[in-house]
Image: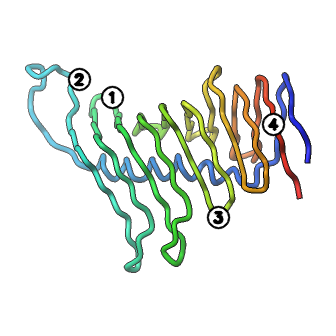
Amino acid sequence: MGGLDRKKPRVFPAGTFLAIALFAAATALAATALAACSFDYGDRSAIGGSDAPDVVMENVDYVRVRALEMQARFTAERAERFEDRNLMELRNFYFEQFGNRGELDSFGRADNASLHLDSMNIFMSGGVQLEVRAEDFAIETERLEWRDQQRVLMGGSEEEVRISRDDGTSFSGVGFRADARRRTWEFSGTAGGTYVHD
């Protein structure tokens, strides 16, 4: 067990980093499925041009089933697709991933999310939470950004990211960055807390 109080970047082993990436990937999957709808409304200049969404869905409930078992569930209060910008905007969304026997494995939520359909980059804001029970891992912050090509998850430069586990690990810091390829976490700003290593 060790205390953390650092003002320079520190790297932590991230065997559970894939749990973080799961939330971003699952959000992209569900939002892409919702985005598959495409309609031609003709000239939109009379209703606001490219500022108006092409597709609006409210009280969305998307369920993915395989072999008669629910794999994932995704809900959103509102989803808007903007064809010209290759953009899907989500409001008040919640995601659940289920394990082999139908048990809840992971879940997450955010007040808002923007999914760029061409790059699959995702920006989440407002009460962002992720919990992966199989990995005993939870993360909370006010904003997260997933950059798909680089396979990098980043917090805001000023926003605090809090990470906790049931074993007593609990720490937070600013300048959070997680790299899926290198399997590391890093805080470029101040970080503090307790990291428990068995």
Q: CA distance from mark 2 to mark 1?
A: 8 Å
Name the amino acid, label 2.
Answer: Ser
The quadrant holding residue 148 is top right
Residue denoted by label 4:
193
Name the amino acid, label 1.
Answer: Arg
Q: CA distance from mark 1 to mark 3?
A: 37 Å
Q: Which residue is painted at 82% across and 47% down in the image?
A: 13
Look at discs 1 and 3 and give the one toward the viewer. Answer: 3
Look at discs 4 and 3 and give the one toward the viewer. Answer: 4
Residue denoted by label 1:
85
Whichever of callouts 1 and 3 sits on the residue coming sooner in the sequence is 1
Residue denoted by label 3:
134
The kind of secondary structure element at disc 2 is helix
Q: Residues within 10 Å of mark 2 (few under 14, many from 20)?
A: few
Whether residue 48 sits left or right of residue 183 in the image: it is left
The quadrant holding residue 100 is bottom right
Residue denoted by label 2:
50
Out of 56 and 86, give the one closest to the viewer: 56
Expressed as whole percent of the image width and height from the top left, the position of residue 183 reads 75, 47
